[in-house]
Image (cartoon, grey):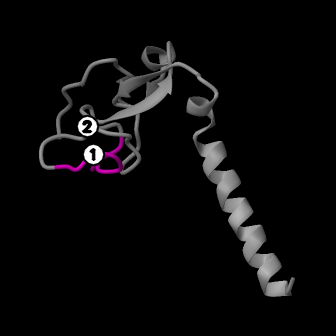
Amino acid sequence: MTKTTNMISALALASALGAALATAPLAFGAEMEKCYGVALKGQNDCKAGEGTSCAGTSTIDYQGNAWKLVPTGSCVSMDTPLGKGSLEPIERPA
């Protein structure tokens, strides 16, 4: 193998490992729940309101109608600068 081929193989392996680790909680069967109002801008998993396409579309930090998947039972104890996480959408002023 050439040096370039080895580098490409190493990058492909690193990418695959990174993707596997990013989904590890779901892959290992951890129970997850939707938690509203805890995602940072652009980092929600889904439901960011009317006119959005879903994941990564929240427009402000801790947007009340955007959710993030978190381990079951941890949502309502999560602290944010605007209050706790919620299992239901939160009404927040824009």
Front position in the image: 20 or 54: 20
> Of the residues shown, which amino acid type is indicated by label 2?
Lys
N-terminal-most mark, 2 or 1: 2
Identify the element where label 1 is drawn.
Answer: loop
Please say if 75 is above or below 20. above
Front position in the image: 90 or 51: 51
Is label 2 in contact with label 1 (beta carbons under 8 Å)? yes
Residue assigned mark 2: 47
Percent coordinates x, y for residue 78 in the rendering:
48, 22
Q: Dot 1, crowdedness within 10 Å: few (<14), some or many (≥20)?
A: some
* Image quadrant assignment for residue 24: top right
Seen at 64% across and 27% down, the residue is 28
In the rendering, which numbered label is found on residue 54? 1
Seen at 34% across and 19% down, the residue is 86
Q: Is residue 60 magenta?
A: yes
Front position in the image: 89 or 28: 28
Identify the element where label 2 is drawn.
Answer: loop
Seen at 69% across and 66% down, the residue is 12
In the rendering, which numbered label is found on residue 77? none
Percent coordinates x, y for residue 87 in the rendering:
33, 17
Percent coordinates x, y for residue 18 in the rendering:
66, 53
C-alpha separation, residue under disc 2 versus residue under disc 1? 5 Å
Seen at 64% across and 46% down, the residue is 20
Please say if 81 is above or below 61. above
Q: Which residues are magenta?
A: 52-61
* Image quadrant assignment for residue 25: top right
Percent coordinates x, y for residue 69 in the rendering:
44, 30
